[in-house]
Image (cartoon, rainbow, N blue to C red):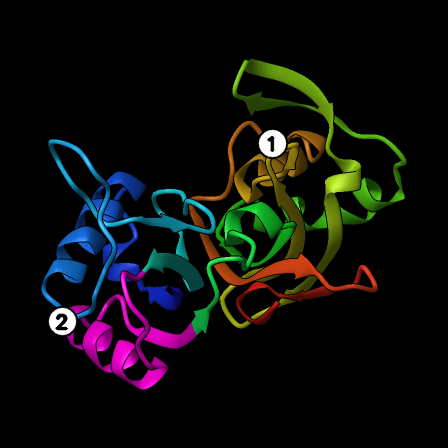
């Protein structure tokens, strides 16, 4: 069986890299009494993977760690053990037991929701570039891929965009594609908005917070990846 652990990553740990987070989770699992399945070989390590790597500097409500167990356990026991092993800035939200045949979360991940907050000089200009972006049928941008940078049409990867003014600036709610063949990262999207607004740089105060990971249900509608 496998256990899906959904946890948050708070602002105090936003500059912890994904590699450091992997190492920390391995240590956390070793501190529990969970029957974690380990790899074979000279340096055994827990059989685990993340649904998606979170970029350094971002925070999140919805990171998912997928861990294989050597024997069956209950969700309550898994929750108790893992919650005790995680620090306050990586709180555990939900736990789910799935069969080994359940698709890997990284394989069925399709998109993610983000809250992007902006404040200071240039924030309003960036937000004002959204309607023009949405009116286009094609927006080309240089996107990093495994084979290097490639000019890509990012407009279809922007599933939903809306903005609101807040007491301190602006917030953009974005639903962006997040799969191996088509990923649009919020920082690239903001860079495109800034360029279209004629800005040389982004506003000084920018925060990117991931709120939900999504897959597609049988009717091809977005659904919370954790319960898909």
Identify the mark at residue 199; answer none if there is no mark. Answer: 1
Q: Nearer the viewer, residue 145 or 14?
A: 145
Callout 1: SS = loop
The residue at 24%/56% (across/down) is 13
Q: Residue 212: x and y, percent?
A: 55, 64
Q: Is residue 16 visible?
A: no
**Pointer 2 residue:** 33
Callout 2: SS = loop
Q: Quadrant of the C terminus?
A: bottom right
Q: Residues within 10 Å of mark 2 (few under 14, many from 20)?
A: few
The magenta span reads: 69-96
The residue at 35%/81% (across/down) is 75
Q: Residue furthest front?
A: 71
The residue at 40%/43% (across/down) is 55
Quarter-wise, where is residue 193 in the image? top right
Identify the mark at residue 34; answer none if there is no mark. Answer: none
Residue 74 among magenta residues: yes
Q: Is residue 80 visible?
A: yes
């Amino acid at each position: 069986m496998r256990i899906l652990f959904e946890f948050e990553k708070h602002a105090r740990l936003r500059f912890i890299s994904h590699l450091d987070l992997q190492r920390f989770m391995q240590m956390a699992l070793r501190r529990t009494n969970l029957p974690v399945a380990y790899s074979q070989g000279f340096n055994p390590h827990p059989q685990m993977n993340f649904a998606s790597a979170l970029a350094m500097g971002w925070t999140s409500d919805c990171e998912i760690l997928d861990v294989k167990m050597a024997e069956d356990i209950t969700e309550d026991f898994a929750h108790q053990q893992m919650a005790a092993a995680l620090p306050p800035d990586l709180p555990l939200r939900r736990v789910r037991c799935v069969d080994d045949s359940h698709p890997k979360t990284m394989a069925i991940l399709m998109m993610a929701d983000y809250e992007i907050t902006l404040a200071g000089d240039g924030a309003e200009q960036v937000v004002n570039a959204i309607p023009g972006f949405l009116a286009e049928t094609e927006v080309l941008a240089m996107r990093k891929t495994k084979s290097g940078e490639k000019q890509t049409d990012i407009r279809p990867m922007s599933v939903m965009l809306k903005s609101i003014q807040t007491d301190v600036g602006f917030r953009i709610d974005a639903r962006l594609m997040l799969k191996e063949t088509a990923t649009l990262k919020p920082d690239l999207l903001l860079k495109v908005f800034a360029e279209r607004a004629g800005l040389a740089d982004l506003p000084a105060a920018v925060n990117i917070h991931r709120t939900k990971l999504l897959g597609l249900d049988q009717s091809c509608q977005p659904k919370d990846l954790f319960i898909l």
